[in-house]
Amino acid sequence: MEARGARREPTMRDVAALAKVSTKTVSRVINDLPGAGPEVVERVRAAARALGYRPNLTASSLRRSDRRSATIGVLLEDLSNPFDAALLRAVEDLARQNDVLVLAGSSEDDAELQRELLTSLATRRVDGMVVMAAGGHQDALQQERERGTPMVLVDRPPTFDGTDSVTTTNRDGSRDAVLQLAGLGHRRIAFLGDRRTLWTSQERYNGYLEGLAHAGLTLHEGLVRTDLHGPDAAENATEILFDLEEPPTALFTAQNLVTVGAMRALRARGLHHSVALIGFDDFPLADMLEPGVTVLRQDVPALGRKAAELVFARIAGDHSPPTHAVVPATLIRRGSGEIQFPNDRDDSRADVLAQQSR
Amino acid sequence: MEARGARREPTMRDVAALAKVSTKTVSRVINDLPGAGPEVVERVRAAARALGYRPNLTASSLRRSDRRSATIGVLLEDLSNPFDAALLRAVEDLARQNDVLVLAGSSEDDAELQRELLTSLATRRVDGMVVMAAGGHQDALQQERERGTPMVLVDRPPTFDGTDSVTTTNRDGSRDAVLQLAGLGHRRIAFLGDRRTLWTSQERYNGYLEGLAHAGLTLHEGLVRTDLHGPDAAENATEILFDLEEPPTALFTAQNLVTVGAMRALRARGLHHSVALIGFDDFPLADMLEPGVTVLRQDVPALGRKAAELVFARIAGDHSPPTHAVVPATLIRRGSGEIQFPNDRDDSRADVLAQQSR
DNA sequence: TCCTCCAACGTCAACGTTGACGTAACTGGC
DNA sequence: GCCAGTTACGTCAACGTTGACGTTGGAGGA
């Protein structure tokens, strides 16, 4: 049942002894290199099979000249976040095609933790890394990059030079969303955003500003709520917005969980059919809510694929100047973003009052 | 900008030369072993820092007696599936506490692919594995286990002896769900299930049968639809159910995506307020739909944590008999599972007709 | 004073594999 | 029949690190 003791894994030496050849010949056979006659090949293969021999990649990569570990590191913010998970999966798919395995880690948007994970990866001599940079300084990333480690940043660009990145059209997408809302007559469009330290948050906010400007609308500071970490914060922030004397008639929620929080609040006040809403980031079941939630969808598999393509190109020795790929986000119209301005003010007011009387 | 050529990573020898000590002494300092005086320690540390030295875990684990790679493998079905992602994250958290990194892979429920990934992990000499066994034969897993690799199966138990596992109360949870529906007066309760090759599907189906039996209900073969892979298949199957002369009045959907597909169909026919629904597996936003979706929630973090605890215990040398941990699933009542039997037949009929007239 | 013991180093070989290079046997051309 | 060229092996050392064991010098006890 339980394997007795730590049974030693068979080595090339064991195979060589059984096949009555030198270890070098075993190496040749295992790696399909020329220089071994057909009978010897067969003998070695048989011996390897008999012993259950499996090469030790650790030893191999130590000795090989290219020093490849056939492993890359993928450092994201939180592997349990669907966005990160989809990214990881896309990278993994390409890794598999390259016979490479993936070491995954969650940096929790903590620069210190990210530094530790980076060191762990370096210690294992990964061939390259795909990293979602944590907010704050990117010193550790830059240092790693300067040592020559192939690295591609996803979702957020590097704050230093010479490194590839893959991002989404955060700014343009956000601007388009705001323009769409403005086109429907909305003049009080609120912005609800994630932590301001995040580059994506800033970009989306900039897109919001651009959208307002293009539409000839003025920015109402009171309609901007940022640093909302998680749905609960977003829910609270939304409630505050609707307690204003002049509440917004449309919301632009700049992140996944923020969208969810805002929806919760709208629903609680019965405003979900009267207040327009467009969110950044798609999420499962967005189409099954009432109304369906209009979102800017990032092409996550494309992001991951592109990032992986870039690392593998670098690993293969591509020395061309750094690429900054941008994958377009597309507006998915489902209803919530198509609610027009002259919305049923009376209804919403009534609901608000009903809510407040609790 | 671009690091010139493949700059060689500094080694212990380089550090030793700079600090004017032997490599062995460097080793002692790096590993915090006794046998180095305070001044030497300082000199070595300074040299290491100056050169940017980082130990090579590959070489280290080759030479060390315990042969640890400080890496475990986690083979799930699909890393982009929220369930799998949450599992991975839970394992990763515990791994971090043990200073271990995680090699992750998606086996796509393909035994052959799983075998390849297993070999890849073995080749890298991981210290242990957490595996969601693919359907079909588990020969490769068993062989790996028999070689002595610490291994824990999650979500599905092993078909062979001597291996730890962590699963959910699939059967009991399903039975309780059916009993709840029966308790509300439902007599025609349909079962919609995933691929029958999956152990979890079978268990949930068995629980369904048990529930019917306990409630004194007879099984209607026509109300059982299995092998639904993905939401679309589930949606079609649901439509077929409601085209029956005597459609069900309640649904038990035995998996995540199946639940979503069934809901889509119910919604399309306007039946979501009249047909009861309980699903296995929770999903985000289940509470925001109308009605809220009643589900059996698995404690995914607990599953992952337990699995990780078990591997690390085995890695640490625990030789006690295999554990088969079972984590309870809990019924989360949100509305859809609380719809009573004498439901508004007229309304639903009307909707059905309206739909069909398209 | 001499011997013991210990701390603080160093030397050497080995982990499992492969690059560089050596060598024997065979092939083919003249 | 001899030599160049090729094929099929083998030998040796090295990758970066650490376990086993050696050496040195000084502290401390009889």
Image (cartoon, coloured by chain):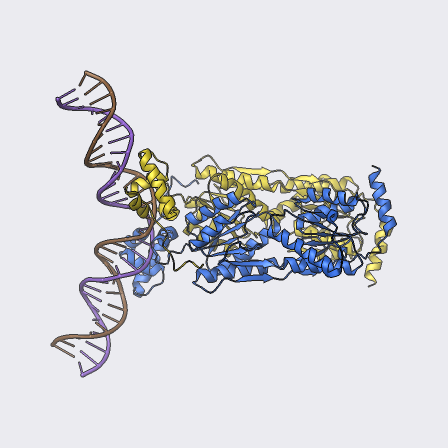
Chain colours: A blue, B yellow, C purple, D brown
Instruction: Specify whether A242 is left or right of A144.
Output: right
Choose top left, top right, bottom left or bottom right for residue B269.
bottom right
For this rendering, which residue is in front, C20 or A221? Answer: A221
Q: Quadrant of residue A326?
A: bottom right
Q: Is residue B175 visible?
A: yes
Depth check, front residue: B160 or B70 = B70
Pinpoint residue A128: horizontal percent, then vertical percent: 46, 55
Residue at 35% across / 50% down in the picture?
B10
Residue at 29%, 41% (x, y): give it: B24
In what quadrant of the picture does the C terminus of chain B appear? bottom right
Q: In the rendering, at what x and y percent does residue A328 appear?
A: 63, 62
**Front-most of A128 and B8?**
B8
Q: Is residue B334 left or right of residue B119?
A: right
Horizontal side, residue B37 vs residue A111: left or right:
left
The tally of labels here is 0
The answer to whether residue B218 shows anywhere in this view is: no
Q: Relative to A101, say whether B292 is above or below.
A: above
Above or below, B40 against A141 in this view is above
Residue B134 in percent (x, y) is at: 54, 51
In this picture, is B291 found above or below B33? below
- Quarter holding the N terminus of chain B is bottom left
- Where does the image place residue A58, in percent across and percent down from the top left? 38, 51
